[in-house]
Amino acid sequence: MSETLVKPSEASPLQRAVGGALRSREIAVFAVLVVLIVVATVKSNSFLFGGDGWRDLLVTPAILLVLAAGQTMVIVTRNVDLSVGSTLGLTAYLTGRLFVDQPSLPIVVVFLIGIAFGGLLGLVNGILVAGFRVPALVITLGTLYIYRGVFLEWAGSDRINPSDMPSGFLSLGTKQILTIPVLTIIALLVIAAVGYYLHTARGGREMYAIGSDPDAATLYGLAVTKRVVWAFVICGALAGLAGVFYAARYGTISSGAGRNLELEAVAAAVIGGVAIFGGSGTVWGAAIGAFLLVTIDRVLPILGIPDFWQRAVVGALIIGAIVLDRVLSARQERALIEARDR
C-alpha cells in the first residue's frame, strides 16, 4: 500500500491560481518589463506615444521572439543552439538572392524556402548532436563558424538593397493590423504554437522529460535521439523564418546580418525562466525575456546610461536568472526530501 508523500492543497482553485501567478518567474519578468516601459515613458513621452513609439515597441522584438521560441525547444532538452544567428544571416541573404534571381517567385514560396533552408541547417546540428552524442555547445559553436564562413564566402562584399525586393514583401516590415505590426502577430502565433506543442503534445512533454533526466528517459524507452533532432530542426526552421523577417524588416542585407543574435536568443530564454540545464521553463517566459532584452536596449540610452553599463545590465540579468533558477531548484529538492522523510 502506497503512502501519499505530499498532502493535497487545502486552498481553493482561485487561491492556488493567484499564488501560482505570484510565484511565477514569467510574471516577475513581465513586471520588470512594465516598470521599464513606464519609467522610459515618464522620462521621454515619445518612447511610447511618439509617431512610431508604439509600433517600434512591438515590432523590434519580433525577430528575437522567433529565435527565442526555437532556442527554448532546444534548451528544454538540455542542449543549446549557438548557430541560429548564422542561420538567420544565411537565410536573410538567401531571401534577398531569391528576389533578385527569381523576381516572379511568390512571397509565400520565399517564406517556405527560408523556413525549409533553416530547418535543413538545424537538421545538420541535430544529427551531429544526437546521432554522435557530442555536446551541443561544441557542435553548434563549430557550425556557427561554418555557417558564418559560408555566408561570408557567398555574400562577400555584396549587399542586398531594398530596391532589389518587392514592395509587397518590404511592407510586411511596417504593415500593421489594429495598430499591431504584422511581424509581431506572426511571431506571437509562432510562440502560441510552440507553447501549445510543448505543454500539450506528447512530443513536447517528452522533450521536458529528456531535459530533466536524459538517462532515465532512455531507460523509460523515450525516443531521445528523435526528439532532440526534431528540437534542432524546429529551432533551425524558426531561425530561417527569422531570417525572412530580417529581410522584410531591414531591407538591407550584408554579410554581418544576424551576428551575435544567437547569444541574445539564449539570454532571452534564460532570463524568461527556461532552465539552462533543461527540463523546465516556458516559451511564454522566453518571449517576455526577448521583449525585456530589446526594451532594455532602447530604455537605457534614454536614461543616460553609457553603452558599457547597458551590456553589464544584460549580463547581470543573465547571471541573476541562473542563480535564481538554482536557488529555486534547491528549495524544491529540500521540500521534496522533507516531505519524504516525514
Image (cartoon, rainbow, N blue to C red):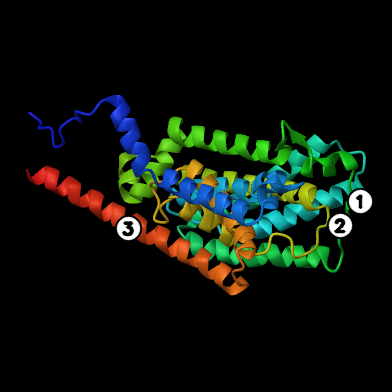
- Residue 117 in view, yes or no: no
Q: CA distance from mark 3 to mark 1?
A: 49 Å
* Label 2: element kind: loop
Residue 295, x across and y down, in percent? 60, 54
Residue 58, x across and y down, in percent? 66, 44
- At x 39% / y 56%, what residue is drawn? 277
> What is the quadrant of the N terminus in the image?
top left
* Residue tagged 2: 160
- Residue type for callout 1: Asp
- 160 or 18, which is in the foreground? 18
- At x 67% / y 40%, what residue is drawn? 184
- Residue type for callout 2: Ile
- 90 or 263, which is in the foreground? 263
* Residue tagged 1: 164
Q: CA distance from mark 2 to mark 3?
A: 45 Å
Residue 59, x across and y down, in percent? 69, 45
* Residue tagged 3: 326
* In the displayed structure image, the side of residue 183 where residue 17 appears, left or right: left
Q: Are marks 1 and 2 in contact (CB under 8 Å)?
A: yes
Q: What label sits on residue 75 in the rendered view?
A: none
